[in-house]
Image (cartoon, rainbow, N blue to C red):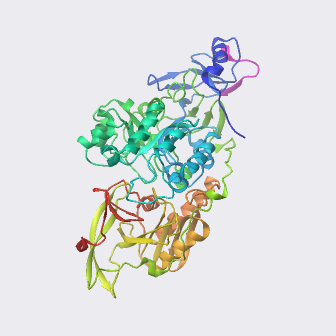
């Protein structure tokens, strides 16, 4: 089964006839309280009539639209709010395919998503993006695709499975579900006038579409102005009030995110609640949510509730998750509000602050009630080439994870990646380590980290150090989700367990595994590109919960530490990361030596 909605132009004659009372509506919702995000009003007693999946009449009395076959929904005094929109997100971070992601978030009231599949682009290239795009278009809700811009995210600092070219971007702009360019992470390239980055943005703007931004530098001076001049229209990398203000002052939309591990709304929303900036230039999003968060806590409803909890007016919070998002992508005449002609995406809720999602309508059809989905989300037929992507080249042993000290050293000072709880940036730390038989041994509170090449079967392993997870005893965590190059990241205190964990993922074709004392505690299988499962979200979430519990059993105390783990190779967010080419100083965008005194 595939879902399709006719264009406004195609159905305008019927919409006019229904609104005028000459024809009967397919659906009428009455007895409710309309939340109008166009005017920021609450309109008691307003009713809604739907025809051909779109709103036809919105007003105080829809009785003239009712015929013998019209479905009637009694709102019973509940609020009618637009379906929620996620302005920036990565489906792959949910560990789910687009179909299963949709099935997970529809009961939470999300009816529109703007997705950037740059995770699969790094593994399977343009072909993988097309697969995600095609499954997205099959769904009963609106999933728009942003063509990935940066694979690799930082050329010269990592090696990906595939590379995205400006020609790929130009080709994708003609696909029906492409809404724009995914986050432009290579901000140094833009600032320095890199021809490929500028060509990608030009192809997007020539197609009349939106360029997504990603500016992770603290420099808000000339470099930031140069980046915005290149065409990036939004940014979700802000972590402080000053970041949000700087973005909107230069005409960008400030996207404030609440993901599984990114808590950047509370620190920025004061730009609205205290500084009084115009909220139309702010958008709420999730960026990255894993399946456990989606199933157990929610999606955009969770973000809106959080914004309200941070002191935001509920109507403003709803605008930032509906009409503001739609307007940003040039779709405010298509969705984002309960108004004539728009797609009939709507939620019935009994409270605007706690936001229980009691009834979800998408394109005029009931898709969920009281947390239970009531439609089928069709699956794409994923080929074998998408399921056989973990190529390690050899069976790894403990010796592959040894860190050899510089000659004749008894102790060394080494750089350490410092994890920061609930934030994407890391710290660049140092620590002193003892050396035994030429091998660097562990130090209190610091684990080893390794990046295992898994695209071209080179058998190469890059080793380093990471702190902040709190792991104790002999253990290891390995994942083939390793933004954005998506090699394999292994973090551990035991080289033997690190080898066992890495080999396990090679055996099952990708996923996340946790080992302790030589035994596997948990395994989340992600067979599609080593990133996603096409199993139901509840099943994947249960496995993810087991993973979180296993990490805790190894001593981890961080909130959603897996998300931190998966970003340790993201070489476009400061300060220190790891790649297949070595340790990366993201403040300088260069490879750096592991040992302080070897430079």
Task: Answer with the quarter of the image where residue 400 lies.
Answer: bottom left
* Residue 307 image position (x, y, % from top left): 41, 40
Q: Which of these two is toward me, 394 or 517?
A: 394
Residue shown at 35% from the left, 78% from the top? 442
Q: Which of these two is toward me, 38 or 494?
A: 494
**On screen, residue 100 above or below 334:** below
Q: Which of these two is toward me, 196 or 190?
A: 196
Q: Which of these two is toward me, 116 or 149?
A: 149
**On screen, residue 372 above or below 444:** above
Is residue 200 toward the left or the right of residue 71 in the image?
left
* Stretch of the chain drawn in magenta: 63-73
* Residue 312 image position (x, y, % from top left): 38, 36
Residue shown at 69% from the left, 41% from the top? 375
**On screen, residue 565 above or below 366:** below
Task: Answer with the quarter of the image where residue 109 lies.
Answer: top right
Q: Residue furthest right?
A: 68
Residue 434 visible in this rendered orientation of the protein = yes
Name the quarter where the C terminus is drawn.
Answer: bottom left
Q: Is residue 580 magenta?
A: no
* Residue 208 image position (x, y, % from top left): 47, 30
Residue shown at 70% from the left, 18% from the top? 66
- Number of numbered tags placed on the structure image: 0
* Residue 242 image position (x, y, % from top left): 27, 42
Residue 215 visible in this rendered orientation of the protein = no
Task: Answer with the quarter of the image where residue 154 lies.
Answer: bottom left
Name the quarter where the N terminus is drawn.
Answer: top right
**On screen, residue 421 above or below 17:** below
Is residue 208 toward the left or the right of residue 56 in the image?
left
């Amino acid at each position: 089964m595939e879902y399709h909605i006719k264009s406004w132009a195609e159905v305008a004659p019927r919409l006019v006839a229904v609104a005028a009372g000459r024809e009967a509506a397919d659906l009428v919702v009455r007895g409710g309280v309309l939340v109008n995000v166009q005017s920021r009003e609450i309109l008691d007693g307003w009713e809604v009539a739907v025809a051909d999946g779109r709103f036809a009449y919105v007003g105080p009395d829809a009785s003239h639209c009712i015929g013998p076959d019209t479905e009637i929904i009694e709102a019973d005094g509940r609020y009618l709010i637009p379906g929620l929109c996620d302005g920036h997100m990565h489906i792959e971070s949910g560990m789910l395919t687009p179909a299963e992601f949709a099935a997970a978030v529809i009961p939470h009231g999300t009816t529109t998503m703007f997705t950037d599949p740059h995770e699969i682009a790094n593994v399977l290239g343009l072909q993988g993006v097309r697969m995600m795009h095609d499954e997205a278009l099959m769904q009963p809700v609106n999933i728009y695709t942003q063509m990935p811009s940066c694979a690799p995210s930082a050329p010269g600092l990592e090696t990906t499975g595939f590379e995205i070219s400006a020609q790929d971007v130009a080709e994708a702009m003609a696909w029906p579900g492409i809404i724009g360019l995914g986050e432009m992470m290579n901000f140094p390239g833009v600032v320095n006038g890199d021809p490929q980055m500028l060509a990608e943005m030009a192809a997007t703007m020539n197609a009349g579409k939106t360029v997504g931004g990603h500016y992770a530098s603290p420099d808000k001076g000339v470099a930031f102005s140069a980046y915005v001049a290149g065409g990036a229209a939004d940014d979700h990398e802000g972590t402080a009030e000053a970041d949000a203000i700087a973005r909107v002052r230069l005409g960008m939309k400030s996207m404030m995110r609440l993901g599984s591990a990114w808590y950047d709304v509370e620190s920025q929303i004061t730009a609205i609640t205290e500084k009084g900036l115009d909220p139309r230039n702010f958008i709420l999003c999730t960026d990255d949510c894993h399946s456990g968060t989606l199933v157990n806590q929610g999606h955009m409803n969770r973000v809106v509730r959080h914004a309200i909890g941070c002191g935001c007016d509920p109507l403003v919070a709803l605008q930032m998750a509906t009409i503001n998002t739609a307007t940003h992508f040039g779709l405010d005449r298509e969705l984002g509000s309960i108004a004539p002609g728009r797609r009939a995406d709507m939620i019935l809720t009994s409270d605007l602050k706690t936001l229980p999602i009691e009834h979800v309508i998408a394109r005029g059809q009931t898709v969920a009630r009281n947390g239970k989905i009531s439609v089928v989300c069709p699956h794409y037929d994923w080929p074998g080439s998408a399921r056989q992507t973990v190529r390690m080249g050899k069976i790894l042993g403990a010796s592959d994870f040894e860190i050899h000290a510089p000659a004749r050293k008894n102790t060394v000072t080494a750089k350490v990646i410092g994890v920061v709880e609930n934030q994407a940036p890391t710290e660049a730390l140092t620590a002193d380590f003892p050396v035994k038989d030429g091998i660097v041994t562990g130090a209190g509170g610091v684990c080893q980290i390794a990046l295992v090449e898994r695209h071209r079967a080179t058998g190469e392993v890059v080793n380093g150090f990471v702190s902040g997870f709190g792991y104790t005893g002999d253990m290891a965590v390995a994942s083939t989700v390793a933004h954005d190059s998506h090699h394999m990241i292994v973090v551990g205190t035991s080289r033997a367990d690190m080898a066992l964990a890495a080999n396990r993922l090679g055996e099952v074709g990708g996923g996340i595994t946790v080992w302790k004392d030589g035994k596997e505690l948990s395994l989340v299988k992600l067979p599609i590109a080593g990133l996603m499962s096409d199993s139901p979200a509840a099943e994947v979430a249960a496995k993810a919960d087991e993973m979180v519990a296993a990490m805790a059993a190894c001593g981890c105390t961080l909130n959603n530490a897996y998300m931190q783990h998966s970003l340790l190779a993201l070489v476009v967010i400061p300060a220190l990361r790891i790649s297949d080419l070595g340790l990366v100083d993201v403040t300088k965008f260069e490879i750096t030596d592991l040992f302080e005194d070897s430079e």
